[in-house]
């Protein structure tokens, strides 16, 4: 499809001028022929040949339905004329439109307003990560239905994007985030109590989920856990925690002698993927936790074919612990630097899940 100029002569004014036609080439009986789709007039609004060529291409795009008119890269004059001639072609039935007939409307983008705008970037990225890890498939094998999985996915992603309390998380989802559109969970049914309940359900499958993720991340990224790092930290509760079985008074790393604590222990590999975690009583000394962790690691399928090197703080490396590591077949390295700050960040949100423990 192309724009063809026709030279004309006005006998009265003795001036020459051009009329333009939109034409289409086709082959008939082995010969190339042309047909006129519509006359375009003088096109005085388009002073350059380049604009005339753009007009023909723009009308062709509209007739083929390849590009939405709202996002055209043509100039304003070209776009306006293209819309006009496109409408005339439709009215006069001068061209067979491919596909369904389209009804285009002109929109002044300066008058467009939006409401209920929501964030989706970070949520989409987290959703893609969960899909790659196939956490939904794992939860299905545990007997979870689609609605429960959708709620769990909503909660996990929301806490990753906006780490806050359950009450604030609900407000974030309903007022700012488009996460429910991604997980297909009705945000009007979301309450803080449902988030508390799904947290408990997730915690009930924590050990199996961690073991699954340990294997899955190794498969996805082709990792070999030759080195693992082990450390602990603790965090305190503001409340009295009378019903908790593991919240105890102990030596707070944040100098909160007045508050009950829990000890958070974690094992990570050198790529900082989580391998194992546990929550101990608040008065548990660091050195006494290692035996429990080593037994769990030995039973984990992620380490069944190898014994990784254990990196730990000097405070954990008592004589009994070192002897126990050697007996279990683990090599070890004493880490002179503490990475408990990382653990604090990783496990701060987990403390809420053990309130009923």
Image: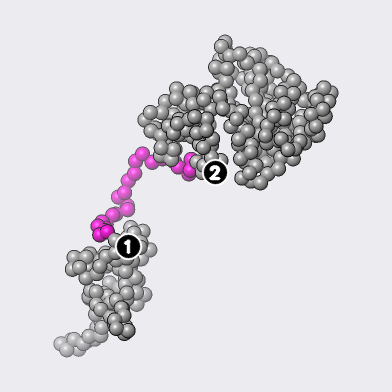
- Residue depth check, mark 2 versus mark 1: number of the one nearer the observer: 2
Locate residue 32, reporting x and y percent. 32, 83
* Left or right: where 286 falls relative to 164: right
Residue displayed at 42% across by 25% down:
191
Bin the neighbour count of mark 2 within 10 Å (Cα to Cα): few under 14, some 14-19, many 20 and up: few
Q: Looking at the image, which residue is at 64% across and 18% down?
A: 261
Which of the marked residues, 2 or 1, is nearer the chain's N terminus?
1
Indicate the position of residue 281 as horizontal and vertical percent values. Answer: 66, 17
In front here: 48 or 155? 155
Mark 2, residue position: 132
In this orientation, does residue 227 appear?
A: no
- Where does the magenta region start and end? 100-125
Q: Say which quarter of the image contains residue 242.
A: top right
Left or right of 9, for residue 312 = right
Quadrant for the C terminus in the image:
top right
Quarter location, residue 116: top left
Q: Secondary structure beneath disc 1?
A: loop
Residue at position x 21%, y 70% from top?
94
Quarter holding the N terminus is bottom left
Q: Is residue 298 visible?
A: yes
Q: Position of residue 252 (x, y in %)?
A: 68, 19
In terms of depth relative to the viewer, which is nearer, 150 or 121?
Answer: 150
Predominant secondary structure in magenta?
loop
Q: Which residue is mark 1?
A: 65
């Amino acid at each position: 499809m192309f724009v063809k100029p026709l030279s004309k002569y006005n006998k009265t004014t003795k001036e020459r001028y051009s009329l333009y036609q939109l034409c289409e080439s086709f082959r008939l009986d082995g010969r190339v022929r042309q047909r006129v789709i519509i006359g375009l007039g003088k096109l005085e609004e388009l002073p350059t040949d380049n604009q005339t060529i753009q007009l023909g291409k723009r009308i062709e795009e509209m007739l083929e339905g390849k590009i939405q008119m709202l996002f055209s890269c043509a100039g304003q004059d070209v776009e306006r004329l293209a819309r006009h001639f496109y409408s005339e072609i439709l009215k006069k039935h001068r061209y067979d439109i491919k596909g369904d007939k389209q009804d285009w409307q002109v929109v002044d983008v300066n008058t467009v307003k939006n409401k209920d705008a929501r964030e989706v970037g970070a949520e989409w990225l987290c959703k893609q990560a969960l899909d790659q890890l196939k956490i939904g498939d794992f939860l299905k094998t545990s007997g979870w239905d689609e609605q429960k999985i959708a709620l769990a996915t909503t909660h996990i992603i929301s806490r990753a994007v906006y780490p806050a309390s359950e009450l604030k998380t609900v407000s974030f989802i309903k007022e700012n985030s488009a996460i429910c559109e991604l997980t297909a969970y009705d945000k009007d049914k979301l309450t803080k109590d449902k988030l508390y309940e799904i947290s408990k359900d997730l915690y009930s499958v924590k050990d199996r989920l961690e073991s699954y993720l340990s294997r899955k991340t190794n498969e996805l990224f082709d990792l070999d856990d030759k080195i693992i790092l082990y450390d602990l930290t603790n965090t305190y509760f503001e409340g009295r925690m009378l019903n908790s079985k593991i919240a105890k008074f102990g030596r707070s790393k944040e100098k909160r002698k007045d508050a009950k604590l829990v000890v958070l222990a974690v094992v990570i590999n050198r790529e900082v993927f989580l391998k194992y975690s546990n929550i101990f009583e608040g008065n548990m000394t660091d050195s006494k936790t290692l035996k429990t962790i080593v037994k769990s690691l030995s039973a984990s399928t992620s380490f069944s074919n190898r014994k990784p090197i254990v990196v730990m703080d000097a405070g954990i490396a008592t004589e009994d612990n070192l002897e126990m590591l050697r007996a279990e077949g683990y090599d070890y390295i004493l880490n002179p630097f503490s990475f408990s700050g990382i653990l604090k960040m990783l496990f701060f949100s987990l403390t809420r899940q053990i309130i009923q423990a």
